Amino acid sequence: MTTINSELIIDTNILKENISYMKTQLNEKSNFMAVIKSDAYGHNIENVVTNIDDLVDGYGVVRISEAKKIRKISNKKILLMQGIYSDDELHKAIELNLDTVIHNKDQFSIIKNNNYFDGLWLKINTGMNRLGFEIDDFLNLYNKYLYDKKFILMSHLAASNDINSLSNKNQFKLFDNLSKKINKDIKKSIANTGCVMNFPSHTYDWVRCGIGIYGGYFQDKNIKTAMTLRSPVVNVRNIKKGERVGYDGRAIAKKNMKIATIYLGYADGLPVAIQDGTEVMINDQIAKVFGRVSMDLTTVDVTNLIDCTEGDWCNFFSPKLPVSNIAKNNDLISYYFMTSIKSRVKKVYKN
């Protein structure tokens, strides 16, 4: 059995730097919620909370099991971002002192029937069309049950990364118009990472940032990727013009080439359809994927590298090679790579 291994290095210092940078964009009253669902986007929820707790005002999760892990470490606000779906879940949320999103009439019925209105975030659909009350339906509930209650009014932007998208303007307008029809003391939250960076005037009382913390936001170079996915070179060979590389012979040499084989494949979390030409980094030099990814191996064109030998590390993404690069070049998103790395890749934490 081989003793070599691929590695996923997680640098929590970079997480803290990213949070500190994003907080400089906020207005003075804005609180910062770190979204750490899906095991903190693959960064390990306990490790992340332990290291960023002094910088954030709360955490956003989807599952109660995630909230339990956080509550053992932190006493700060925890929000169940998709809410509760049964009386039992409500009672568990109360026991753990969790805030909860209410986004439909069934969820509201659970709250109303238990006469429990603490820590509620009422979610409004302003254009994402996934979750959230339609505005008229919300106003009916508000006028009947919520007019004297404290809660947070929230919505979610569909295109915050695109500063020119008309949907942002439309969503802000609907959200602001609604907020004028309810108690002026009600707190508000609509901002995700893209909104913080592109529309800081709309950061209101709470921002809910996820991808920017981990460095998957590609529009600002001050935000760095906190993960390094790397694996060693296990073979280097020369091939001649016209020879093919990998399954199905997809990659054909147009000249004499030098090919490195990397100990990482789709069983480790790389998409099998990664395109030829996708950039990786070996010895701080750019090399490019050449040939179809297989279960355990990926082949890379290192013809133009000054040096490349067996045992050298090949980085697929890192602080120097943003995860957004490999995502954009393969018509994927950064979230996919962060949350898809498999358990056989060794995790290393730099704290």
Image (cartoon, helix red, strand yellow):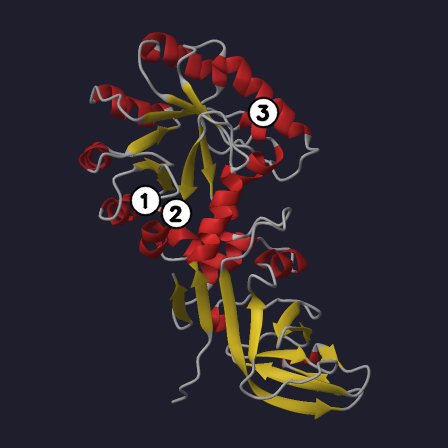
Residue 75: image location, x then y, percent:
25, 39
Q: Amino acid at mark 3?
A: Gln
In this rendering, the answer to whether 200 lies above or below 180 is below
Q: For residue 307, which numbered disc appears in the image?
A: none
Apparent side of residue 146 relative to residue 315 in the rendered image (left or right): left
The C terminus lies in which quarter of the figure? bottom left
How busy is the neighbourhood of tag 2: few (under 14 within 10 Å), some, or many (20 plus)?
A: many
The disc label shown at residue 171, or none: 3
Q: Residue at x 49, y 61 (%)?
A: 227
Task: Say what secondary structure mark 3 lies in.
Answer: helix
Per the image, the residue denoted by label 1 is 63
Query: What's the CA distance linking mark 2 and mark 3?
Result: 25 Å
Where residue 266 appears, x then y in whole percent? 52, 71
Q: SS of the residue at dot 2?
A: helix
Q: Quadrant of residue 149?
A: top left
Q: Which residue is mark 2?
A: 37
Please, what secondary structure does the residue beneath circle 1 have? Answer: loop
Q: Left or right of 124: which side holds 316?
A: right
Q: Relative to residue 58, is residue 4 depicted above or below?
A: below
Q: Position of residue 284 (x, y in %)?
A: 63, 73
Instruction: Answer whether labels 1 and 3 touch (C-beta < 8 Å).
Output: no
In the foreground, 191 or 12: 12
Residue located at (71% from left, 69% from top):
277
